[in-house]
Image: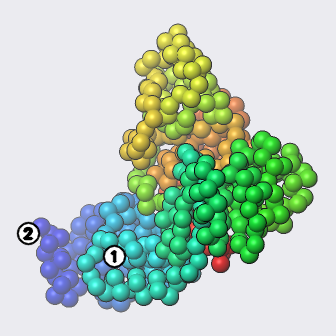
Amino acid sequence: MTVFDEIKRMIEKKEFSKAKKILERMEDDAEKYNTLGIICYYEGNIDEASNYFRKALELNPVHDDALFNYSKVLFEKGLHFESWRYLTRINRKTWEIFDMLGDTQLRQNNLAMALHYYHKAVELSNLSEMKNKYETLKNQLKKALRLAIFCLPRLDNFIKDIVSVLSEIYEVEVVVTTDGRQIADAYNRADIVWIEWANEMAIYITNNFPKNDKKVICRLHSYEALGNYPEKINWTNVDTVVLVADHIESILKAYHENVYKKIREKIKIIPNGVNLNRFKYTIHSPGFNIAVVANINYKKAPEMWLQVIGMLKKIDERYTLHVAGGFQDLRYLHYFKYLIDDAGLRKNVRLYGFVKNVNEFLEDKNYLLSTSIHESFGYNIAEAMARGIKPIIHNYAGSKKQWPKELVYNYIHEIPRILNQEYSSDEYRKHIELNYSLEKQIKTIYSILI
């Protein structure tokens, strides 16, 4: 029997004083403070318990038991958002975790997300009480409305989580096609129409079908505003124009002034959201492994990657660039093969091609490099930060509003400054929790659907 087994036995027998005396003689570690927190909680000293759980997390920020216990105390103190933040950081999630995640969302009136989490809890639990809890709330919230989401093939990556969650409340039909008859049939069945991307699909639907009493939403991401799509859409048949960032509105205003004047009152900014439960939070630190997660095309300015690693190699030859992404232009493939060999970068650049499991790829990386000349959001940046990894971000228009300014550079000679700054996995994760969670995105989307 270990010391902690003996302490656990004492706690079960409510011999709290004896257990405390043993713990107080032990060296400081997360397990010690987590156990002291449990004792204080059982004694009814919630504030003291909270302090001990926080101490445990200072020593080990990814201690699952301490994360759960701290979340529970925060929830009982009415700090539901903070409780949710720490629950998402738990790596091994049981049905109890998802149940509590659902509770945090219900208390914040994020009804679709609450149902989503309760559903996950039901899938992991055989308890009839959990099933009844989920089904009772679903029966209260379920709407007899059909939501049709229209998207062109191969452009549906950004709607999958949204569909999964909203399906808890609406009858959701996802229409990924170019077939006019399929589009017409789905449109006629729908009460609410969501057009994903303001591209050819939006042009076709808004110019060919009567709006009638349908609620029509069109989400414009980025590339559409940099082409001539906005002028071809019949915006009279659109109720809400969803933009994913403020700087996309600036682009519309600058390059589509007449259209912007017509639609500015319809615009709703809803930033993209990251499913934080999908990205394992771990503590990262300074090192020499630099990740790039991007398709290799002109927008990502990949030639800059080689300039960066060439510069860093002069500082320390251990710096290595790990590139996850496929070449979308043969010119870049030819250029990379040539320059990596000719500039002596073979030991410093590793090309992985398309990587399916980005979460796993990022496991041992210290930094995420983004050299894009334009982004509407930058999921690669957000996902790395969710994992606790420091990003190094080129100053595209809008970047300083989306990301911490100290992580943004103009010229590559500024990158060593970012590398040498304080490294804080907690702050990187927290930035996504506060600004770009799936929960926040869903709550705002739901508000425009009802």
How dense is the environment of label 2, judged by Cα within 10 Å: few (below 14), some, or many (20 and up)? few
Q: Residue at x 86, y 45 (%)?
A: 255
- Residue 393, placed above or below residue 297: below
How many marks the image carries: the answer is: 2
For this view, does 181 lie left or right of residue 395?
left
The residue lying at 51 percent from left, 38 percent from top is 293
The circle drawn on residue 122 is 1
Where residue 224 sits: x, y (%)?
Answer: 73, 46
Does any portion of residue 92 appear in the rendered image?
yes
Q: State the residue at coordinates (77%, 42%).
A: 226
CA–CA distance between discs 2 and 1?
Answer: 35 Å
**Residue occupying the far left of the picture:** 1
Label 2: state its secondary structure: loop
Q: Position of residue 313 (x, y in %)?
A: 51, 22
Camera-nearest residue between 81 and 443: 443
Residue at image point 71% right, 71% down = 215
